[in-house]
């Protein structure tokens, strides 16, 4: 069950070939995207996702996304969805065909959420630390590296997942060359120690997470202290609990890190998940 709507409002068959072969999104990964969780017909954090789409587009110097057109496009996907209670809503915005009239390509797609991701919300995951190969200092100096943009160039992120699988792990936590913790290939890292939740800062070249943002909002209201600051690998390993946060996986518990079983955080996971859900 999939629903595809082009940015001009055309509802179309997801099986039909539609993208031109010279689209720069395909030939160069030159574009941006978002993945939004929809539950019971309601998209979560739509505003922050559209804000981030605009931020990513600005970093790639793409035309400013037409927010009203995206909102209409999203609504059409919601109206046409006949799948289950949950949907992953993907927005894709590319520089368009290389030999076209310069118009960008945009579409929104409603997709079912994979069983593996849904199961991991309950069971938790094993994660490995992998070198991401950059020093956070480069972020400000080299904006052309697009660190922190949600660009379509996710081949490295997907390769990291394949590597993790080859060593028997489900997930990845990237580490910078200065030893600081970054993010997962498609998630943010959140730790809990005492009454404090921590995540790593966007200034280190990571994506500002909408799920982490929602969790921290709810946690602050419930009396938690929240911190967005650099984190060393030692601090990660010493935390009482480690979680990966993203739209489709919600708040997923890491139960094993680099082969070491972490203390049982199921109760804390339940508490944080309830806080996150209380936002909706
Ligand atoms: C690299 C990266 N970091 C973090 C996230 C989490 O962001 P969000 O919670 O907004 O889904 C994602 C989402 O896919 C991601 O790709």
Image (cartoon, rainbow, N blue to C red):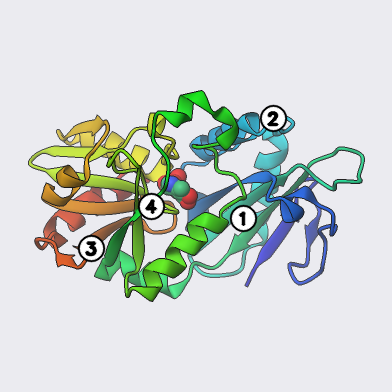
The answer to whether 220 appears left or right of 4 in the picture is: left
* Image point (85%, 57%), residue name: 20
Q: What mark, if any, has residue 258 been given in the picture?
A: 3
Element assignment for label 2: loop
Count neighbours of disc 1 (C-alpha within 10 A) and say few if under 14, some if 14 to 19, many if 20 or more. Answer: many
Per the model, the C-alpha gap separating discs 3 and 4 is 14 Å
* Residue 184 percent coordinates (x, y): 38, 52
Mark 4 C-beta closer than 8 Å to ligand 1: yes
Residue under label 2, please give it.
61
Q: Is mark 1 within 8 Å of ligand 1?
A: no
Q: Is residue 56 above or below residue 33?
A: above
Residue, x 50% and y 50% (percent of image)? 42
The mark closer to the camera, 1 or 4, is 4
Label 4's element? loop
Alpha carbons under labels 2 and 1: distance apart: 29 Å
What residue does disc 4 label? 184
């Amino acid at each position: 069950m999939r629903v595809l709507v082009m940015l001009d409002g055309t509802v179309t068959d997801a099986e039909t070939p539609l993208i031109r072969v010279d689209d720069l999104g395909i030939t160069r990964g030159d574009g941006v995207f978002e993945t939004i969780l929809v539950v019971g017909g309601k998209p979560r954090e739509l505003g922050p996702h559209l804000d981030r789409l605009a931020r990513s587009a600005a970093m790639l110097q793409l035309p400013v996304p037409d927010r009203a057109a995206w909102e209409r496009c999203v609504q059409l996907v919601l109206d046409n969805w006949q799948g289950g209670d949950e949907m992953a809503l993907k927005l894709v915005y590319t520089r368009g065909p290389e030999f076209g009239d310069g118009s960008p390509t945009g579409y929104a797609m409603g997709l079912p959420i994979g069983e593996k991701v849904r199961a991991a919300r309950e069971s938790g995951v094993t994660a490995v630390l992998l070198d991401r190969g950059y020093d956070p200092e480069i972020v400000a100096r080299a904006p052309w590296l697009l660190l922190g943009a949600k660009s379509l160039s996710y081949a490295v992120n997907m390769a990291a997942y394949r590597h993790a699988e080859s060593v028997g792990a489900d997930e990845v936590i990237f580490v910078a060359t200065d030893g600081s913790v970054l993010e997962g290939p498609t998630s943010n890292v959140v730790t809990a120690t005492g009454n404090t939740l921590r995540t790593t800062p966007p200034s280190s070249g990571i994506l500002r997470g909408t799920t982490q943002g929602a969790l921290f909002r709810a946690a602050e209201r419930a009396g938690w202290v929240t911190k967005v600051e650099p984190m060393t690998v030692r601090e990660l390993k010493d935390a009482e609990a480690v979680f990966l946060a993203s739209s489709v996986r919600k708040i997923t518990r890491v139960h094993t890190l680099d082969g070491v079983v972490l203390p049982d955080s199921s109760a804390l996971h339940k508490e944080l998940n309830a806080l996150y859900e209380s936002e909706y």
